[in-house]
Image (spheres, rainbow, N blue to C red):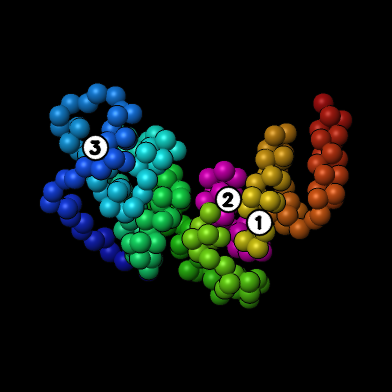
Amino acid sequence: MIASRTQFLLPPSFFSSPKLSKTLKCLPAVTADSGLLFHEKLQYLTGLKIDTHKALSQNPNLRSTPLSTLYSVEHCLSSMGLHRSAIGRILDMHPVLLTSDLHLYLYPVFEFLLNEVKEMVVRSPGLLTFSVENNLMPKVEYFLMEMKGDLEELKRFPQYFSFSLERKIKPRHKMLAEYGLKLPLWKMLKISDGEFNARLVDMRLRIVGET
């Protein structure tokens, strides 16, 4: 069960750093009040050891996201047993998570993993050897946000996590997406490169034949 919401308090004083100054310089002029609130946001992110300049570059929505939303994201990850240092590393690697819809992305992912972990481990024992931060989270994020996948499909094919995100999952998904095509995960990943390319050509020819 997900732990109840906890309260977070801002540190009592502000501080400046080269990273914060660099970030503030790249922003448009703001009023005194909004500038103060934004400074609080940068201070909070820096406290998590998040590169604020990189985070804003990769996720511009951070500029207008309320600080309370960032607290909620940290609380969600903390309630799942992640230490604050680990949360900071995850959010620094994937700033898009800072403004993600908790009930659309993060909570469903954790609920899914908690409820289905036994069945998934039986199907794919290698899950026990994978890093949550370096393997599971990036692949779940890509599957949900880029592939617009269904969590039920991950339950049916947990072997998805055993394939390389950069060398196999992303390239094959992008090749399919380029032509508006889609395959079930197991069909997309279990076959060799040669078989995948042949299947891709066959699917494209079928589309041409139907037009």
Depth check, front residue: 180 or 43: 43
Magenta span: predominant SS is: helix
**Residue 121 appears left or right of 16:** right
Q: Residues within 10 Å of mark 1 (few under 14, many from 20)?
A: few
Instruction: In the rendered structure, find residue 194 and report the number of the disc placed on it.
Output: none
In the picture, measured across the screen, residue 149 lies left or right of residue 202, that is left
Expressed as whole percent of the image width and height from the top left, the position of residue 210 reads 84, 30
Q: Is residue 97 visible?
A: no
Please tell me whether mark 2 sits on a helix, a strand or a loop: helix
Q: CA distance from mark 2 to mark 1?
A: 13 Å
Instruction: Of the two numbered discs 2 and 1 on the same chain, state the one appearing first in sequence.
Output: 2
Q: Percent x, y for residue 127?
A: 59, 70
Closest to the observer, 42 or 117? 42
Where is residue 170? Give x, y as percent: 65, 46
**Residue that badge 2 annotates:** 143
Which residue matches tag 1? 164
How far separated are the C-alphas under marks 3 and 2? 32 Å
Magenta region: which residues? 139-159
Name the residue located 84 percent from the left edge and 29 percent from the top edge.
208
Along the viewing direction, whichever of 129 and 22 lies nearer the viewer: 22
Mark 3 or 2: the one toward you: 3
Residue type at mark 2 is Phe
Q: Is residue 55 above or below residue 210?
A: below
Q: Quadrant of residue 177?
A: top right
Q: Quadrant of the C terminus?
A: top right
